[in-house]
Amino acid sequence: QVQLVQSETEVRKPGTSVKVSCKASGGTFSSDSITWVRQAPGQGLEWMGGIIPIFATASYAQQFQGRVTITADEFTTTAYLEVSSLRSEDTAVYYCARNIRVGAAEDYFDYWGQGTLVTVSS
Amino acid sequence: DIQMTQSPSSLSASVGDRVTFTCRASQSIGTFVNWYQQRPGKAPKVLIYAASSLQTGVPSRFSGSGSGTDFTLTISSLQPDDFAIYYCQQSYNTPYTFGQGTQVEIK
C-alpha cells in the first residue's frame, strides 16, 4: 500500500519561498512518477508538474516554469516542491500524488498525500 | 493546453437517484480521461481511469463512458457518501488539466 505523507502547514510572506515535502512509502519510489497539484481556496485542481526520481528531470506546467522546482531524493524516498517569489495568489493546498502509468491509456493519480496548506500573507 | 469543461457545475439530487454528469475536452483525447471525487477537506480520490475502468475498491455504482471529446460519469444510485465534488482530468498530454468540477448536493 502506497502512502504519501506531506509536511505541515506553512505561512510565508510575499516574495519569499516555501518548500513542501512528500514522503513516500510502500511503492517503488525511484521509478514511480510523483506529481504536484494545487487547489486555491474554494477553487478547482491545478496540475503544477511532476518528476520520476530515477530520471531526476521534472516537467512543469508553463505557468509555473521558472518559479517552481520539483526534486526528489531517492535515498529518503521524499519528493519536494519549492515555490519561490510567493504571492497571495499562491495561497492554496498543495497535494502530491503518485502518477501511475499502466497501459496505453492508463495514466492517472492513484495515491495522494493529505495536502499541505500554504498561506501567503503580509 | 487541453481545456476540460464539465456540466453542470452543480446539481441537487436525492439518495437513490441516478445522476450523470459530463465532461467535454477541447480536442479529441481518445480515452485519456480520469474521474476523481473530492469530499470537503480531503484529497481527491480516483474513481474511474481511462474513461471507463473502475479503480480497485470503488463501488460498482460508479461508471464512466465516452471517447474522443465527450465523457460521462454516472452514479447509478446515489448514496450519502457520494455528496462531493467530481472532477474530470485529461492525461492525453501535459500539462494535465482538470475540469472545473461538478458539486453534488443533497436535495
Image (spheres, coloured by chain):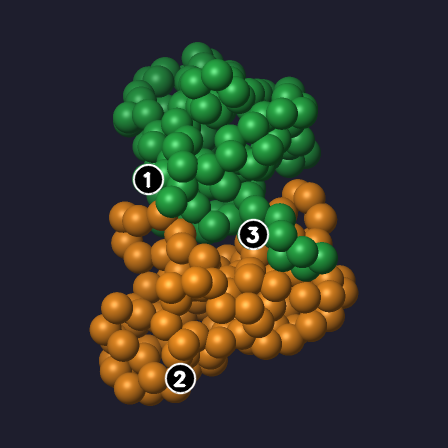
Residues tagged 2 and 3 counted as in contact (Cβ below 8 A): no
Q: In which quarter of the image is the C terminus of chain A?
A: top left
Residue at the extreme top of the image, as rendered: A16
Mark 2, chain letter?
A: B
| Type of the residue with mark 3 | Tyr
Does residue B89 sit above or below B75 in this rendering?
A: above
Q: SS for tag 1? A: loop
Quadrant of the image containing the N terminus of chain A: top left
In the image, A79 versus A66, the foreground residue is A79
Determine whether, in the image, residue A32 is placed left or right of residue A65: left
Discs 1 and 2 share one subunit: no
Which amino acid is tagged 2?
A: Ser
Can you identify the residue that label 3 sits on?
A108
**Badge 1, how many Cα within 10 Å: few under 14, some, many 20+?**
many
Disc 1 residue type (three-letter): Gln
Which residue appears at 51% of the width and 34% of the height? A28
Please name whichever residue, B76 or A40, is drawn nearer the observer in this view of the structure: B76
Residues behind callouts 2 and 3 on a single chain: no
Where residue B89 sits: x, y (%)?
57, 56
Q: How far apart are marks 2 and 3 (CA)?
A: 23 Å
What number is the disc on residue B91? none
Residue B104 falls in which quadrant of the image? bottom left
Picture disc at residue A114: 1
> What is the letter of the orange chain?
B
User: Is A105 situated above or below A119?
Assistant: below
State the residue at coordinates (39%, 79%). B61
Q: Residues within 10 Å of mark 2 (few under 14, many from 20)?
A: some
